């Protein structure tokens, strides 16, 4: 593994989102002095928070899986997740609603899920689920060790016996077809393949290797932090400052000062911060602009679909909703074509509806409820541009409410007391390329060693982290990206929690990479 050369005593981390906070905690645990700079007034980045008339709204991800990765970050500075954060495991993890009126509770534990599938479909499908679970567990164990939790210096690093093992597991087939070897019911197949959209690829075209996301989502446990998802970055920031980090909020980075190939200082609109190394977590175009170099690629980056999100604070809720509800339309393959090929909003949308107040009522005023409705939509590279979305937004909001009204949420429009609609216009205004918060898609040419790397030629002491670089999009992978970035700085292998060596002085100790 290549690491940074020269001194790395003081590292400036640009961005206090999940990737930056993960990097900071692992760097602190390795004895580095760390300063974080964040343009917003609070930590979190995409996992932010806004107050909507007394409703506490998470502005980013709503699903937390693989909490052991969070535990590793806390352990790096000698503390525990439980000291900072209370997690509730959701049972069921999801509730799936289908256009034919059927419903399925998605459990992450094998016995209740097998029983639910037996009730929902048949004993044969329940047995198929057991085989699917075994396959996904093997796929996850192999990929996490070799292909996800790894810093790649060259595509040649793929040439190991594990590549042959991945092929033998069917990882280079198509996701939908491989899942179909185990379960035939189309509704069930949707539950275990829709996660391909997180990677920006339709299930029928996604590599089966991406089914590892389905493992994380439907088998590894889904959790919710007390205080909402924003409680996670808040807790990580608390742990970082407790371990000696300085965090400067309200600082927008304007330039990186350099001497030759080394960055010597980070300049914000409010301060100049000398440094020995830098971890950059903004979206790739911003990071490359600051570095003054965009790496050449044979094929331009292809971005994932975007999303329209309706945040709705209401005076009532609906009994059929779980904490997370998947509302599937009748159409399936055509909706993916609309998103990824034709550049049109889904005509028959499949939606993720999150009701955080089902688990934490304190996120809304007394007797009120908070709903988060996510509708995938094309990114602005292939779909409507930001000006078009400005005109489309009011009509699309009304369309979503009509769809929700017809799918078991009657009267939702009249029940709304406070709301906010987020479209690709807003994502673009936050600096997200192609108007999508999901960054570069996980096509084969943009995965593993082919994804934009976390080291950029021409700069000797900078590392990238975040969803645009290794290993990719999603809360678990972004946390890993921060740890992998820290490993590039420290030269310490990732994946093993390391307690702090001494009391706070260790956070400012010197030491080269």
Image (cartoon, rainbow, N blue to C red):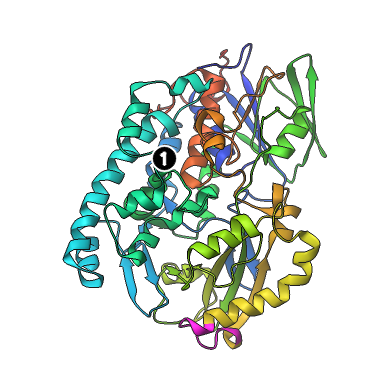
Q: Which residues are magenta?
A: 405-413
Q: Is residue 362 or residue 283 the one in the foreground?
A: 283
Question: Image check: 179 left or right of 239?
Answer: left
Secondary element type, mark 1: helix
Q: Is residue 223 magenta?
A: no
Q: Can the viewer see residue 242?
A: no
Q: Which quarter of the picture shows residue 222?
A: bottom left
Say which residue appears at 64% left-offset and 59% top-offset.
342
Question: Image check: 71 left or right of 241?
Answer: left
Q: Dot 1, how many residues are within 10 Å of its Cα: few (below 14), some (14-19), or many (20+)?
A: some
Residue 387 position in % (x across, y down): 81, 62
Residue 189 position in % (x across, y down): 35, 60
Say which residue appears at 28% left-offset and 52% top-offset.
181
Residue named by callout 1: 69
Question: Image check: 154 left or right of 422?
Answer: left
The C terminus, quarter of image: top right
Q: Is residue 198 or residue 252 the one in the foreground?
A: 198
Residue 172 position in % (x across, y down): 40, 38
Q: Can the viewer see residue 132?
A: yes
Q: Is residue 258 or residue 145 the one in the foreground?
A: 145
């Amino acid at each position: 593994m290549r690491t940074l050369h020269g001194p790395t005593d003081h590292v400036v981390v640009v961005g206090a989102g999940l990737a930056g906070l993960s990097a900071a905690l692992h760097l602190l645990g390795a004895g580095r002095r760390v300063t974080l700079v964040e343009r917003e007034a609070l930590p979190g980045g995409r996992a932010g928070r806004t107050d909507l008339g007394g409703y506490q709204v998470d502005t980013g991800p709503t699903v937390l899986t693989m909490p052991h990765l969070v535990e590793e970050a806390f352990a790096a500075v000698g503390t525990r997740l439980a000291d900072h954060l209370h997690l509730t495991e959701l049972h069921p993890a999801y509730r799936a609603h289908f256009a034919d009126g059927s419903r399925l509770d998605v459990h992450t534990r094998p016995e209740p899920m097998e029983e639910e599938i037996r009730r929902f479909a048949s004993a044969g499908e329940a047995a198929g689920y057991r085989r699917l679970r075994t396959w996904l567990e093997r796929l996850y164990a192999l990929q996490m060790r070799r292909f996800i939790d790894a810093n790649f210096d060259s595509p040649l690093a793929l040439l190991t016996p594990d590549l042959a093992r991945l092929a033998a597991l069917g990882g280079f087939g198509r996701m939908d077809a491989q899942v179909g070897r185990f379960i035939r019911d189309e509704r069930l197949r949707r539950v275990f393949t829709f996660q391909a959209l997180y990677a920006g690829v339709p299930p029928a075209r996604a590599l089966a290797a991406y089914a590892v996301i389905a493992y994380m989502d439907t088998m590894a446990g889904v959790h919710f932090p007390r205080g909402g998802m924003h409680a996670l970055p808040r807790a990580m920031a608390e742990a970082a400052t407790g371990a000696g980090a300085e965090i400067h909020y309200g600082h927008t980075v304007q330039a990186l000062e350099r001497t030759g190939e080394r960055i010597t200082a980070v300049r914000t609109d409010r301060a100049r911060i000398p440094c020995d190394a830098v971890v950059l977590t903004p979206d790739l175009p911003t990071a490359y602009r600051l570095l003054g170099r965009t790496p050449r690629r044979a094929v331009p980056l292809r971005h994932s679909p975007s999303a329209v999100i309706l945040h709705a604070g209401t005076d009532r809720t609906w009994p059929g909703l779980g904490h997370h509800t998947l509302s599937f339309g009748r159409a399936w393959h055509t909706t993916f074509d609309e998103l990824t090929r034709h550049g049109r909003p889904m005509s028959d949308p499949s939606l993720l509806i999150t009701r955080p107040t089902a688990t934490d009522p304190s996120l809304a005023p007394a007797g009120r409820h908070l709903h988060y409705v996510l509708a995938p939509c094309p990114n602005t590279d292939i779909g409507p541009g930001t000006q078009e979305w400005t005109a489309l937004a009011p009509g699309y909001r009304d369309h979503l409410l009509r769809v929700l009204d017809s799918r078991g949420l009657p009267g939702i429009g009249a029940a709304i007391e406070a709301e906010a609609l987020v479209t690709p216009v807003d994502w673009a205004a936050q600096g997200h390329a192609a108007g999508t918060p999901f960054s570069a898609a996980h096509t084969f040419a943009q995965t593993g060693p082919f994804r934009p790397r976390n080291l950029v030629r021409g700069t000797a002491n900078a590392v990238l982290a975040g969803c645009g670089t290794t290993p990719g999009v999603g809360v678990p992978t972004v946390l890993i990206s921060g740890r992998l970035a820290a490993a590039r700085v420290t030269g310490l292998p990732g994946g093993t929690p390391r307690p702090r060596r001494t009391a706070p002085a260790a956070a400012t100790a010197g030491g080269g990479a």
